[in-house]
Amino acid sequence: MKILHTADWHLGQTFYEYDRREEHLHFLEWLKQQIRQHEIDVLLIAGDVFDSPNPSAESQRMYYRFLREVTSENPSLQIIIIAGNHDSAARLEAPNPLLENMNVTVRGVVRRNAEGDIDLQHLIVPLYTEGEVTAYCLAVPYLRQGDYPSAENYSKGVQLLYEQLFNEVKEKGLPVIAMGHLQATGSEISEDDRSERTVIGGLECVSPDAFDEAIAYTALGHLHRSQRVSHRENVRYSGTPMPMSFAERNNASGVVMITISAEGTGIERLAFEPLAGVMSIPRQARPLEEVLQAIGDLPDGDVTLRSPYLEIKILMTEPEPSYKYKIEEALKGKAVRLARIAAMLPQKKASGIVATSYEELQTIRPLDMALDVFKRKYGGTEMPDTMKQLLESVIKEAGV
């Protein structure tokens, strides 16, 4: 049995006002080629199919067109999809009656029976080879409060759910695949990345021990960096098909192919080259003059769909009203797409003004307060005389 593991597509994402539709279409075409070329039996999509719980009509068309085309081209292909934290679980599951006729199974909602117990069988999906059940998939979507068995915390509850699911199938003697959309302990998160939902203090981190050693492979989604978890080769994040933020510029893109045979489980990464990359210049925020020099080193050419998205980091040590204009002028004729100018301030220094009471606060002159704020904001730089004189005249006219 050959399985392909992918996740975190984020269809419909707008990257700093740029539509990424063509980039996603490029990935989906590549994915269809891999499925044909490697004769894949099962495609696992481990959550965050869409970037929003209320995806656009165009994003949904892209998604359903892919499912229709890939299942038509590969009649024996089985697809299992779980909802991520960006998805609407109910919306993703709604077309199940139609999708099941295409051999597509979606799990977004954790159901409970009349007694209030979790419907474990709903989350266990048989995998078929030539009409016979040859493996089982534990298709667990992103779990919210109340979706898991009662436990002392989130991590313990999630672990207990996987244990219960595995106990339902372990005696059948067939390989077991697990799916999840979560943050696993020991995984790496892209630095300063706000596109991945993480919880301070690791309160929602799930130990890899939640996945029994006897499970052949665990397909995870949620974290955008492709990686194995805690040195366990068979517990992996596939990563995103393309960088979802500038913090992910060095992440490798692709999918994971798993081959399960009598000899064991083989794992191989299939690398994907996104249509467009992302880049940041300079590596660290620098003054405007150095930024303009770095722009000059960028390649010349026309802007196309393959042109990288550009982030510019500029160090603001003093007011510079025209910096955006100068940067945009310097970028003319460069084969990049400006997405973001990050104006960064120097490390703030301690304030020179200290007021411990209301009476003391009344003794501080407004001009002194303004001078102090300016100095702290621009890393110790004194306010220019012309600005100081203008501010003095305004204060005098206001009578304060």
Image: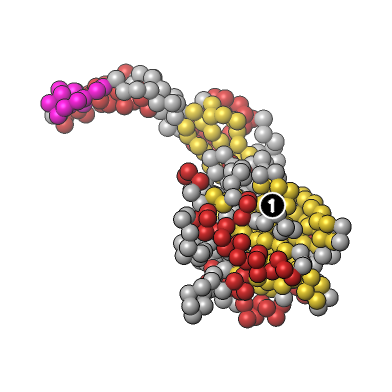
356 within the magenta span: yes
Q: How is the image coloured?
A: secondary structure
Q: Which residue is mark 1?
A: 235
Q: Quadrant of the C terminus?
A: top left
Decide: is 210 above or below 62.
Answer: above
User: Residue 182's spot in the image, x, y percent?
Assistant: 57, 55
84 within the magenta span: no
* 145 or 246, nearer to the observer: 145
* 8 or 219, nearer to the observer: 219
User: Residue 313's spot in the image, x, y percent?
Assistant: 54, 33
Q: Is residue 192 left or right of residue 3?
A: left
User: Which quadrant of the figure has residue 290?
Assistant: top right
Q: Quadrant of the N terminus?
A: bottom right
Q: Is residue 277 left or right of residue 85?
A: right
Q: Is residue 145 visible?
A: yes
Q: Inspect the image, locate mark 1, and give the three-letter code of the amino acid beneath it.
A: Val
User: Residue 225's spot in the image, x, y percent?
Assistant: 65, 46
Q: Is residue 310 left or right of residue 232?
A: left
Decide: is 172 above or below 345.
Answer: below
Q: Residue drawn at (52%, 59%), measured in percent from left and top? A: 157
Q: Magenta stretch? A: 353-366
Q: Residue furthest front?
A: 171
Q: Secondary structure at mark 1?
A: strand
Q: Residue drawn at (67%, 34%), measured in percent from left and top? A: 298
User: Residue 50's spot in the image, x, y percent?
Assistant: 58, 62
Q: Residue drawn at (47%, 32%), measured in percent from left and top? A: 344
